Amino acid sequence: MGLGHVGAAISFSFGTWLNVMILFFFVKYSSVCEKTRVPFSKKAFLGIKEFFGLAVPSAAMVCLKWWACELLVLLAGLFQDPKLETSVLSICLTISTLHFTISYGLGAATRNVLGYAYTHDSEVVHYVAVMTPFICASIFTDSLQAVLSGVARGSGWQHVGAYVNLGAFYLVGVPIGVVLGFIAHFRAKGLWIGIVAGSIVQTIFLSIITALTNWKKQAMMARERIFDATSSDESVTDHMNNA
């Protein structure tokens, strides 16, 4: 149909909604899910305030990090050769997230040809090869912060993590990237160094918070939350049985 990238976006959206509809009809009409279809009750909203109290800051932790990365990609469009700079940063951002889905390896052996997985432009590929050491640094810091962020979310410190990410990336990372990229003329390399700097600051602060935590107190708080959740579940179950 000649829709190009717009067609790809439409196809992805259609597939996602088709999945939603299939799951909806399966839950509604399948005998397997028969016992899950209960009358609507206000009890379903028990604990919704506590849920959003954790969910919103948790989402902010993730979004603030990725928005900072996307912001620097957009800033790359202000350089003298925006096509080259944005292409390189986009590829670097994609490569830096691969360690979340596949194992490490082949990095050193494929450094000079790695960019060809995403483009056939030799200039972009050469630029990506130059950026590879900085991508490796980003992967290393991301691995540390991923674990520490998981500790923060698991301990209910989502709001603390959101503030840490806000300061690390928007008060440190992005400004450093802008200075190195536009003033020091490091271009995309400078912007990426800003991302790495933000990740390092994020990792340092989360490490300090984790190291200074009273884990015995955290265990007691977790136990209390489990008891509260159990009490709420029993209340909902009693209401369903009475209905």
Image (spheres, rainbow, N blue to C red):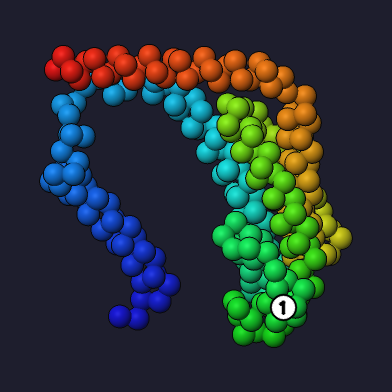
Task: Tell me if 27 is positioned left or right of 224 in this view.
Answer: left
Residue located at (44% from left, 26% from top): 51
Q: For the C terminus, which image quadrant?
A: top left
> In the displayed structure, would residue 168 be above or below residue 236?
below
Residue 172 in which image quadrant: top right
Is residue 12 among the parts visible in the rendering? yes
The answer to which quarter of the image holds residue 64 is top right
Given the image, on which type of amino acid does mark 1 rest?
Answer: Thr
Res 189 → quadrant: bottom right
Q: Residue at x 51, y 28 (%)?
A: 54
- Identify whether 101 is placed above or below 156: below
Please state, as top left, top right, bottom left or bottom right, where the N terminus lies in the image: bottom left
Is residue 229 or residue 91 the one in the foreground? 229
Quick check: 43 left or right of 122?
left
| Secondary element at image label 1 | helix
Where 128 sits versus 47, above or below?
A: below
Which residue lies under the disc numbered 1? 110
Report crowding for label 1: few under 14, some 14 to 19, many 20 or more residues within 10 A (C-alpha). few
191 lies above or below 25: below
Q: Where is residue 100 in the image (x, y as percent from the top left)?
A: 60, 56
Q: Residue at x 66, y 16 (%)?
A: 217
